[in-house]
Every structure is written in C-alpha cells, then in structure tokens.
Image: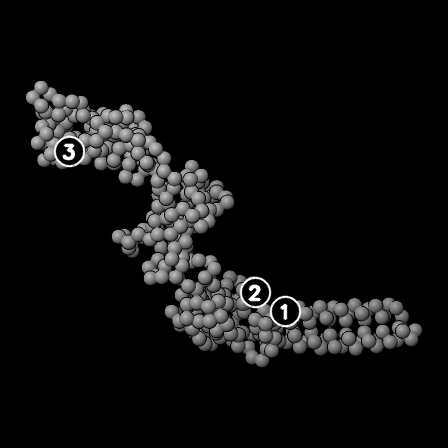
Amino acid sequence: MTEKQLEEAKVEVNVADEQDVDDTILTAGRVTFDDALVAHIYSPVNGRVIRIDATLGQRVKKGDSLAVIDSPDLGIASSDVGKAQADLLAAEHDYNRQKELYAGHAASQRDYETSEDAFRKAKAELDRALQKARLFRTGNTALVTQGFALTAPIEGEVIARAVSPGIEVQGLYGGGTAVELFTVGELDRVWIVADVYEMDLARVKVGSKVHVKVVAYPDKPFEGQVDWVAGTLDPQTRTVKVRCTFQNLDRLLKPEMYATVSISVDEKKALALPRSAVVRMGDSTVIFVEKGKTPDGRIVFERHPVTVDEGEGGQWMPITHGLEKGTRVAVTGTVLLSQSISQGP
C-alpha cells in the first residue's frame, strides 16, 4: 500500500514493546445488603395479623411497632408463668415447713430433702416460663392480652413487607417454616459480592479499587473497594467470595441486582499490542507486520499468526508467541489490511 492509501485507511504502525497489562480482574457479582444496616424480621409466635403499623418506605426507630399479631402463644406463656408462680409458692411453703420440722426432729431427712428438691424444681420452672415470656414480649412479662407487637430491632426504612391484615403467620418457635414478614434497613451503603477464581486470588487484596457496572445503568460506573476476602474456596466452582463496599446515597444499586465487577490489581510487564492490532481470520489469530518497501515506494505488510492471552489485560493484549520486541506492527486499520490480503493485489 502507498503512504496515501495508509493515511486514507487510517492505518497506524507502532513498534511492539512491553506494556503494563493485566491491571484488572473481570468477574460477576451480585448486590446485597450491608449486614450491619439491615434486619430481617420474623414472628416468634403463631397467630393472625390484626393490624399493620408500618408501610413500605416508612422510616422507623428501634422498638417501633411494625404489626400486631393476635396469638394464643401469649396466653399460654402467661398461663405458664402464673402456674409456675403458684407451684413455686406451694413448694416454698412445704419446704419451709419441712425445714422447721426437720430442725425439731419431727420430720425425716428424706422428707426434708424431697421438699427441698421440689422447691428447686419449681423455681427452675418459673425461670423457664419467665424467659419464654420475655422472649415473646421483648423483656416485658406483663402479658395482659394476646396481642403481640412485632417491633423493629434497628432504626431504618421499611424496605420490604410480606404481610397483610388477617393473614396467618408461623412463628419461629412453632416448629414450622417461618416467613420473613418485614425487612428494615438502610440502602445508603451496600455490598457487592463477587466470585474470584483461585488463580487470581493472590492478586486480590483488601483495599483494592473496584469498578462496577449494572444492566440498569450501563453508562454509569460505580466505584468502591474490596473490604473482605473469604478464607475458603467453593469446592464446586473453585472460586472465592470477595466483598466490596459501595456508597449508595442516590440508591441506584438495588439488592439482588447482577453486576459486572472489575477489580484493580497490580500491573505486570508483558509484550503486548492494542486489541485493535489483533484480527481473527478463521481459526487463526493474526497481526500485520511491516516488512519494508517495494522499489516503487509502496509499504509491504505480511500476515503473521500469533498466540495471545485473551484472559489478560485491559486495552492491551499480551502476545505469548509469534512476535518479537521491536517489530513494527499495524495497530489500526487492520480490518482493511485483512481484506486487502484476502483479495490479493
């Protein structure tokens, strides 16, 4: 090709040299809640929802009521406490009486020890009943009604709600499968959990910068950093979980979104060409090497097969075989060159 043809075809030639490559690891990830800023709320009791106190998007404080559940479990717990208190009082009276009789040699040691054992068992049963009541009432054992107030354990926004008035709910301690009723939390900061293959693990460090793109906002990159690397590998996929933290003040990142994650890692030197210099021709990967000039001044290009490492690099593609340092290679306009060679002179 003449120099004018090269200029019109925008063919640019550069000298092959070592470049900084492999500065990112590309993988897939998923947006999740920051565990420290979210609470998944289940009902500890069986019953029927009689009132909803919190709506979606509403901000609540710790201890605010989310819903009220009419539950027979509270009546049973209240009855257990009353019965345990009565049993303890009777056992205490009997124990004190047997203690006095035993001190006056009017009762046997066996009767005294039996009453003492009964008193201790009654006391333990009352403690058990009170602990169960505190669990249902979050510390309040004054069980007056069967209405259980489901409260927010943290301050935040009601992000999800899976309950409506009149619905029957299964309690955590009822022996069945409980359903999450509310999700309360903050979305100002979220996590993205990504999978890193074992061969890349040594280059990923806590503090590494991360760039993320999601389908909903293809032109908007999100920036964060790696703050945790799992200590074990998944035996099936041979990957390690890596967690990245992102500030999400505009709340564009939603939990359960899929993301493309680019993790910045240490660069390394390798003989590489721009990706535009490498062309696929059938089953071969080729580059176009400048071989000099013809007697009439035209520049000669020759097609050279090369071996590349496509899994590495960003804008640069490492050449592992078929290229020597200092070779002049066409880095743009290679599509035109491949068509010219295919069609011949």
Q: Provide residue 283's location: percent of width, then percent of height.
A: 25, 29
| Residue contact at pointers 3 and 1, CB within 8 angstroms | no
Left or right of 259, for residue 2: left
Q: Provide residue 12's location: percent of width, then percent of height.
A: 17, 33
Q: CA distance from mark 3 to mark 1?
A: 81 Å
Q: Which mark is residue 131?
A: 1
Above or below for 59 versus 23: below
Residue at coordinates 10% horizontally, 27% vertically from top-left? 1
Residue at coordinates 61% horizontally, 75% vertically from top-left? 141
Q: Provide residue 39's location: percent of width, then percent of height.
A: 47, 63
Answer with mark 3 or mark 1, whichever residue precedes in sequence: 3
The answer to whether residue 281 shows anywhere in this view is no
Type of the residue with mark 3: Val
| Residue farthest to the right, as pictured | 105
Q: Which mark is residue 173?
A: 2
Residue mark closest to the camera, 3 vs 2:
3
Above or below for 96 versus 20: below
Answer with mark 3 or mark 2, whichever residue precedes in sequence: 3
Task: Describe the element under mark 1 as helix, strand or loop.
Answer: helix
Left or right of 334, for residue 246: right
Residue at coordinates 23% horizontally, 29% vertically from top-left? 15
Type of the residue with mark 2: Tyr
In the image, 125 versus 278, the foreground residue is 278
Residue at coordinates 42% horizontally, 63% vertically from top-left? 186
Residue occupied by mark 3:
11
Residue mark closest to the camera, 3 vs 1:
3
- How many discs mark residues in the rendered view? 3
Task: Describe the element under mark 2 as helix, strand or loop.
Answer: loop
